[in-house]
Amino acid sequence: MTGFLSDHSLGPNQIEFVKLVIDYLTEHGVMSPALLYETPFIDFHHAGPNGLFPPARVDELTAVLEHVRAMATAA
């Protein structure tokens, strides 16, 4: 997630979206990528992350969430 926030080309909605993902992970520990397409994440754009980020960045975000889940279930 740090890579997303260190990208200086992110707009305000993109930054808030990533912060919301971080907040969700902090509260719940893991997050299904499917949640990115539900409220409150679609409040930033009706298409969720696909409306805010290029496809490669959405893939990167999904991979991070899957990695976090894998690490949590391995413990």
Image: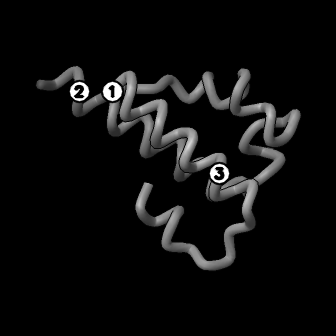
Q: Which amino acid type is marked by label 3?
A: Glu
- For the point 61% across and 23% down, the residue is 35
Which-is-in-front pick, marks 1 and 2? 1
Depth order, front residue of 16/48? 16
Tell me which numbered mark, 1 or 2, is placed earlier along the sequence. Answer: 1
**Tag 1 residue:** 29
Disc 1 and disc 2: Cα gap in Å? 8 Å
Tell me which numbered mark, 3 or 1, is placed earlier along the sequence. Answer: 3
Relative image position of residue 20 (x, y in whole percent): 57, 40
Helix, strand or loop at label 2? It is helix
Depth order, front residue of 49/74? 49
Task: State how many labels appear.
Answer: 3
Depth order, front residue of 72/28? 28
Relative image position of residue 37 (x, y in whole percent): 72, 27
**Tag 3 residue:** 16
Near mark 2 (Cα within 10 A), the count class, few <14, some 14-19 or many ≥20, is: few
Please report contact status of discs 1 and 2: CB closer than 8 Å, yes or no.
Answer: yes
Image quadrant assignment for residue 15: bottom right
Which-is-in-front pick, marks 3 and 1? 3
- For the point 43% across and 45% down, the residue is 64
Q: In screen coordinates, is 10 left or right of 62?
A: right
Near mark 1 (Cα within 10 A), the count class, few <14, some 14-19 or many ≥20, is: few
**Tag 2 residue:** 72
Helix, strand or loop at label 1? It is loop
Q: Which amino acid type is marked by label 2?
A: Ala
